[in-house]
Image: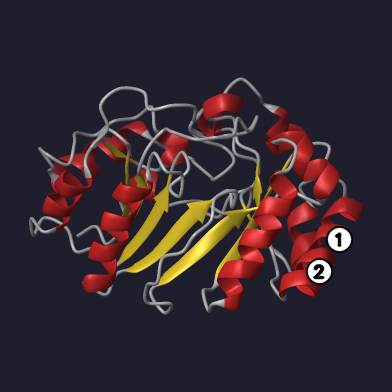
Amino acid sequence: MYESFTIILSNWCNLRCPFCLQNATINNGKEVSAESLISFFESGKVAPKVFKLTGGEPLSPQVYEKTKKIVEYAISKGIRTQLNTNGTYKFTGDFDKELLYFQVSLDGLKEKHESLRGNGTFKKTVSFIKRVTKIGYKVNIMQVLQEETTRDEVEEFINFSVNQFNIHPKFQRMAPSGRASGNKEVINIDYDMDEFIENKGGNCRGVKYKCTTPEGKSTQIGIDQHGNIIPCPLLGKYKFGTIFNFNEFKIRQEMSSKLKGCTCCYPDGYKGEVRFGHI
């Protein structure tokens, strides 16, 4: 049974990041309710143990009530929950700090981060990280690597993150999906960057990581903001039914026949043209 769920709570976001996987802007049509999601998780068709809540921006006023209901449900069931955020909104919730943790987007130091996410965002995000860690929440820091990202920038950012927050950051390569769907620059990225980052104490998941979800072998799956079943946010264009007509056998069968050779920065595997991937 599926156990791990990446849930796109909404398409609403206050930022317009050039590499956004969702091309998040405003709510685009009727979005699935928290109550419908909870009913699905209670249906007995799945066995949820892990939630990854994303958007859009889950902590925005436009989305937070929905986010809160899902988090409250998850905590009540002992489901470990990662909440992805850009860190520009305050968070005052008091939840189980062993079950809820944050992944916060911080794309370099001030100049670099604000060139991508807008003026004033760096200070807000840094303040968010300090505030939630101070009250006991665990935080992952995530930076999106782009073609122009240099090793000096990466090393400087890792040092900043460790010195400021005592957190070793994670890195995700920019993927041609969502707002960056027409951008193939990932092909030109320095492929030795993974090892460089790991040697500096960071973590990079992308080129060398091959996901088993598209092969129909994984216990993880995605749900988009409309309740459609998707492999993951990177492959949101592929729909395999909805939470209202969920059929695990059919999903796994169809997914394995349609999706092959996928990695986190090569959605669809560019028709099998994956240069680095564990088999």
- The residue where tag 1 is placed is 155
Horizontal side, residue 137 vs residue 124: left or right: left
Q: Amino acid at mark 2?
A: Lys
Q: Is residue 219 visible in this depiction of the protein? A: no
Q: Position of residue 32 (x, y in %)?
A: 23, 37
Q: Residues within 10 Å of mark 2 (few under 14, many from 20)?
A: few
Q: Position of residue 217 (x, y in %)?
A: 31, 54
Q: Residue at x 37, y 43 (%)?
A: 63
Task: Determine the image quadrant of residue 48.
Answer: bottom left
Q: Residue at x 37, y 77 (%)?
A: 96
Q: Residue at x 28, y 71 (%)?
A: 75
Q: Quadrant of the N terminus?
A: bottom left
Q: Could you give the CA–CA distance between mark 1 and mark 2, rounded to whole angstroms?
A: 7 Å
The mark total stands at 2
Horizontal side, residue 59 vs residue 130: left or right: left
**Who is closer to the viewer here, 24 or 222?**
24
Horizontal side, residue 263 vs residue 192: left or right: left
